[in-house]
Amino acid sequence: MKINGSEIKPGNLIEHNGGLWAAVKCNAVKPGKGGAFNQVELKNLMDGTKLNERFRSSETVERVELEKKDFQFLFEQGEGLVFMDVDSYDQLELQKEFVGDRAAFLQDGMMVTVQLYDDKPIGVSLPDQVVLAIAEADPVIKGQTAASSYKPAILENGVRVLVPPFIEAGERILVDTNEITYLRRAD
């Protein structure tokens, strides 16, 4: 879908210079002399490079809509993570580094959303919250109220989080996968 350069907003995905770019910041500029333009900070979705570009309102760019598909996490294979398309049963293997730090939160059978551009994966969205057990937690030191009321703990997947002092090893907690933080005890 073609849009004018002045219609680009933060969060829009556009095709520009042969690449796929996300608009990070936009600033409409109306100089005293000359035509108005939109100063846009772009981030390349493939390699992460940034670019500042001016778009005049007379210019048009191709706005891109990503295809989102539901996949189920099957298993880990070396440095790869194997997912299955729930509609076609096709398998997709992605590298751990593509998913990033949040790969530690993947559990067998977990449903994720993969964002595709021209049938090529460019992003993976995990559920916002997962339930995990505490593998190790420091013991509570009585009377330690002057310091922060959180203590370090290690989850069953090896990730470190800060938890309140009443949480002990073996308990199940709800963890935010975006911020990698403790939310509450699991029901």
Image: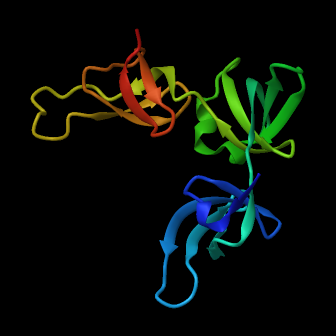
- In the image, is residue 30 above or below residue 125? below
- In the image, is residue 167 above or below residue 1? above
Towards the viewer: 71 or 138: 71
Give the quarter of the image for residue 79.
top right
Tally of marks: 0
Q: How is the image coloured?
A: rainbow
- In the image, is residue 111 above or below residue 94? above
Towards the viewer: 80 or 11: 11
Instruction: Return the x and y of residue 119 as percentages of the image width and height.
Output: 86, 42
Residue 79 visible in rendering = no
Query: As drawn, which residue projects farthest toward the top?
Result: 187
Towards the viewer: 163 or 114: 114
Instruction: Return the x and y of residue 33 as percentages of the image width and height.
Output: 51, 91
Give the quarter of the image for residue 100.
top right
Q: Is residue 109 left or right of residue 23?
A: right
- In the image, is residue 57 above or below residue 69? below
Residue at 63 percent across and 53 percent down: it is 12
Q: Is residue 66 left or right of residue 183?
A: right
Residue at 45 percent across and 40 percent down: it is 179
Instruction: Return the x and y of residue 2 as percentages of the image width and height.
Output: 76, 57
Residue 100 visible in rendering = yes
Q: Is residue 151 left or right of residue 13?
A: left
Instruction: Return the x and y of residue 107 as percentages of the image width and height.
Output: 64, 22
Give the quarter of the image for residue 35.
bottom right
Query: As drawn, which residue projects farthest toward the bottom?
Result: 33
Residue at 73 percent across and 45 percent down: it is 65
Residue at 69 percent across and 72 percent down: it is 58
Q: Is residue 175 left or right of residue 8?
A: left
Q: Quadrant of the C terminus?
A: top left
